Structures are given as C-alpha cells and as structure tokens.
Amino acid sequence: MSIPDINSIREHIVTELLNDTSICIEPDQDLLLSGMLDSLSVMRLVAWLEAQSSISIPAGDIVLEHFGSLEQINTYLVGRVS
C-alpha cells in the first residue's frame, strides 16, 4: 500500500476532521498552531495515515515538526517508508 499524497491528506482533513470542504489548506499552512487541528484531530489523522499506508507511527514521532503542515506530514511519511 502506498502513502497518501498531500491532496489525499488535505481531502481527509477537510472532509473527515473539519467537516467543511470550503476550507482551503495550503501545503505549508500551519495546521496546529493556527488551531485548525487539535490533539484529538491529530490522533484521528495519525490513525487514518497508518491505515492508508500500513505503517506504524510511534507516539514519539507525533510532534509539531512532523505534523505541523501538509508538507511536513508528507515529508515524514516519505521518510518512514524509505
């Protein structure tokens, strides 16, 4: 199974986590410090990413540096499967 791309992650966030498809998320937009996602949303996102990519994301890796933006999430996932 492959990892979700930025567009798939964006789509999941706006439809499943925010329930508002009118929201536009830029690849470098801060998801956490802006308040767009909270800790529960991040955990739901991590569970979805694990299911979609068949990788395990250790709790210690769920940090701002890896999950702060779509680009950071994508970079982290690519690094995990490499």
Image: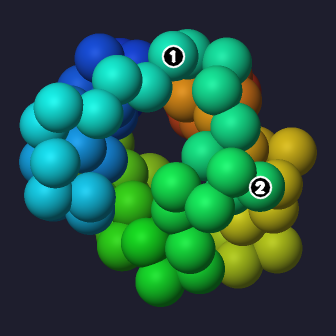
- Relative to residue 29, is residue 25 drawn left or right? left
Task: Write down the residue under mark 1.
Answer: 26
In depth, the one of 9 and 53 nearer the eye is 9
In the picture, the quarter occupied by the C terminus is: top right
**Earlier residue among tags 1 and 2:** 1
Query: Does residue 74 appear in the picture of this structure?
Result: no
Would you identify the image quadrant in which residue 9 lies? top left
Task: Write down the residue under mark 2.
Answer: 33
Task: For mark 1, give the secondary structure.
Answer: loop
**Residue 66: x percent and y percent?**
76, 45
Q: Which mark is residue 6?
A: none
Task: For mark 2, give the secondary structure.
Answer: loop
The residue drawn where x is 72% and y is 65% is: 62
The residue drawn where x is 43% and y is 25% is: 25
Q: Is residue 55 above or below residue 69?
A: below
In depth, the one of 31 and 9 nearer the eye is 31
- Relative to residue 6, is residue 42 drawn left or right? right
Disc 1 versus disc 2: distance between alpha carbons?
14 Å
In the picture, the quarter occupied by the N terminus is: top left
**Residue 23: x percent and y percent?**
29, 33
Residue contact between numbered discs 1 and 2, judged by CB atoms under 8 Å: no
Circle 1: residue type: Glu
Q: Is residue 22 above or below residue 46?
A: above
Circle 2: residue type: Leu
**Residue 41: x percent and y percent?**
43, 72
**Residue 4: x percent and y percent?**
31, 28
Q: Is residue 61 above or below residue 12?
A: below
